[in-house]
Amino acid sequence: MARRIIIECGCDEAGRGSCAAEVYVGAVVLDPKRPIEGLADSKKLSARKREVLSEEIKLYALSWCIEKASLEEIERLNVLHATLLAMKRAVEGLSVKPGRVFIDGNHVPKLSVPVEAIVRGDETIPAISAASILAKVARDHAMVEYHRLYPEYGFDVHKGYFTKDHREALCKHGPCPIHRVTYAPIRQMQLFV
């Protein structure tokens, strides 16, 4: 009797810890017959390497999907629940239905297939690494576009994370329309009166 092969999917996000813009989520089903060399946690790869790998993933994966949690969803649901919702959409958006889903981290969305959270899974599970890369590249592109709209904040450099330069820009200019106004560090700066 032939052994049934379970199609596995990796899923990860980019931007959850940021204080601006959307959270992007990638879901990927890799093709075991076409392995992609160099997959790793997206944060440990150079921007150039991520770009190259993103193109390879889109070309060679059996299926991939990128979704996002909108700013409105993040503010209304909180960033964790909005991210889980985007993860559900990304997995459901795959053209190949997985039999099992691996999520980076310690929270999982409600799905119709078995799902497992793996802390630091983007370092050990190639499909999660691939999802991490797709999400990071897509979000970085969006942040460069936001930089064109709001150049005074430096979104092209810090990508919305709460760096010293970003804090200084917020103190000088106040928040712009893509800032997460419910984010505690922004609230604590007492920018809103």
Image: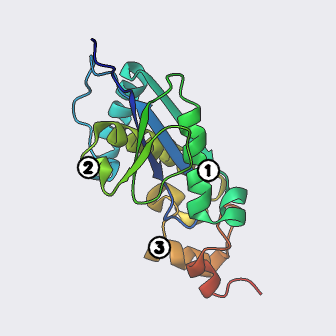
Pick the front one: 133 or 151: 133
Q: Secondary structure at mark 1?
A: helix
- Give the crowd class for mark 2: few <14, some 14-19, many >=20 residues within 10 Å: some
Residue 182 occupies quadrant: bottom right
* Residue at 64% from the left image edge and 67% from the top image edge: 180
Pick the front one: 33 or 152: 33
- Give the crowd class for mark 1: few <14, some 14-19, many >=20 residues within 10 Å: many
Dot 1 or dot 3, earlier in sequence: 1
| Residue at the limit of the structure toward the top, as seen here | 1
Residue under pointer 2: 123
1 or 3: mark nearer the eye: 1
Residue under pointer 1: 85
In the rendered image, the vertical position of residue 156 relative to residue 188, given as above or below:
above
Residue 5 in picture, x, y percent from top left: 33, 22
What's under tag 3, amino acid-wise? Asp
Residue 171 visible at all: yes
Q: Are marks 2 and 1 in contact (CB under 8 Å)?
A: no
Residue under pointer 3: 165
Dot 2 or dot 1, earlier in sequence: 1
In the rendered image, the vertical position of residue 119 relative to residue 42, given as above or below:
below
* Residue at 28% from the left image edge and 12% from the top image edge: 2
Q: Secondary structure at mark 2?
A: helix
What's under tag 2, amino acid-wise? Glu
2 or 3: mark nearer the eye: 2
Pick the front one: 68 or 178: 68
Q: Label 2 vs label 1: CA separation?
A: 23 Å
2 or 1: mark nearer the eye: 1
Q: Quadrant of the C terminus?
A: bottom right
Dot 2 or dot 3, earlier in sequence: 2
Residue 92 occupies quadrant: top right
